[in-house]
Amino acid sequence: MQNESVYRELLEKYASHFGGEPSVAAYAPGRIEVLGNHTDYNEGFVFSAAIDYGTFFAVCPAEGTSCRLVAGDLMREVTFDINEILPSRNDTWQNYVKGTAAGIVALAAGPLKGFDAMFLGNIPLGSGLSSSAALEMCTGLALAKLYGVETDPVTMAKIGQKAEHEYAGCKCGLLDQISSLAGKEGMLVKTDFRSIVYETVDMGPDACFLMVNTNAKHRLVDGAYDQRRQACETAAAHFAKALRHPVTHLRDVTMAEWALYRRGLDPVAADRAAHPIGEDERVLLGAQMLQTGDLSGFGRLMFDSHASSRYLFENSCEELDAVVDICRKIPGVLGARLSGGGFGGSVVVLVHPRDAETAAAAIANVYNAKFETPCTVSMIHPAAGACLVK
């Protein structure tokens, strides 16, 4: 089983803390975003992949209505009532679980008992690999099983998204949740976020990924993410008035139309809009390149994507830019870009498997020399999506 040592540790801690075994356990992976940045809430296209790092959630029903929740890494417990699940200002990690639990409870037939639960994972926090969505999806799968709730993947993803919006305070799209649920071994996930239809795409044996965690902390609830989203909505409203065809989201605007009709739009909002518009076109072009086996072309699109993040969307940072600049100079590296919301976190690097070890060492050495602090470079294998394990 994937990450079996983490699961064994969770079961040991659960037994020690609660004095028994869980009746249900679920696992959900983190994700890398390979191409298509900030396009999900603009109803665009994304290439992503579930990764072989994730989170487990173990739970057993309680006698009353009280819910005991323990973060397995901290061994810190919080409590709440199953009939009154409210966001918390303290120990804010619990909000991802509480928001997901509220979504499952809303679909369950009552009255409901509470539960004893614990979670534990190995996704580096703040790395931009969506530890939050992994926690939401394993929570959702486990609690749905516990309470006899039947859901489909899109419904479960939307429950996690609502938890982010209403409990964690981040207006994210559906990318992270869909990627965690839909992953397949060795495959990319290509998602159309207008229809919420996804498919898996094989990259072939000549490609693998490195994950470079800069250890520059990734925070999306401080307003930067929401500011970018608001700028995209402002731009979409502008183009809806300027263009003759219907525009509801930036997905409906081409780069040619952006160039011709951006006049009258605030320059910052115009730059912000250019990023997801260009990303949609890069994803569609990248899909064609994968069909023909053009990994070098796909990698160039990844470099272009990061440049767009860096100069137009301004959701990069010095550490992320440095890693991408390093990657441009390393033989065997095909492409690199920030992964996820940005403002810190990780870079995903496309490389030939034969060059992965050499490239990883070069990235780590140059980064350490520049910042006098290490980054963490790991091989990433596109992995299977979330599932019940007990």
Image: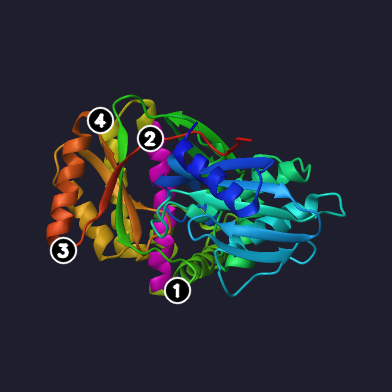
Q: CA distance from mark 1 to mark 4?
A: 48 Å
Q: Which mark is residue 372?
A: 3
Q: Main secondary structure of the magenta part?
A: helix
Residue 178 visible in the snapshot: no
Residue 40 visible in the snapshot: yes
Left or right: 11 in relation to 20: left
Residue wearing tag 4:
353
Q: Residue 60 appears at what percent x and percent y? A: 70, 47
User: Residue at the spot x=41%, y=46% of the render?
Assistant: 32
Left or right: 107 in relation to 382: right
Q: Residue 135 appears at what percent x and percent y? A: 56, 52
Q: Which quarter of the figure is the C terminus placed in?
A: top right
> Any magenta on residue 331?
no
Q: Secondary structure at mark 3?
A: loop
- Mark 3 or mark 2: name the one nearer the start of the chain: 3
Q: Secondary structure at mark 4?
A: helix
Considering only vertical position in the picture, is 127 above or below 269? above
Residue wearing tag 2:
381
- Mark 1 or mark 4: name the one nearer the start of the chain: 1
Q: Residue 379 appears at what percent x and percent y? A: 31, 39
Residue type, label 4: Pro
Residue wearing tag 1:
264
User: Residue at the spot x=25%, y=55% of the render?
Assistant: 375
Considering only vertical position in the picture, is 185 above or below 120? above
Q: CA distance from mark 2 to mark 4?
A: 11 Å
Which of the two residues, 341 or 277, is positioned nearer the viewer here?
A: 341
Residue type, label 1: Gly
Q: Residue 321 appears at what percent x and percent y? A: 24, 59
Considering only vertical position in the picture, is 343 above or below 331? below
Q: Which residues are magenta?
A: 268-288
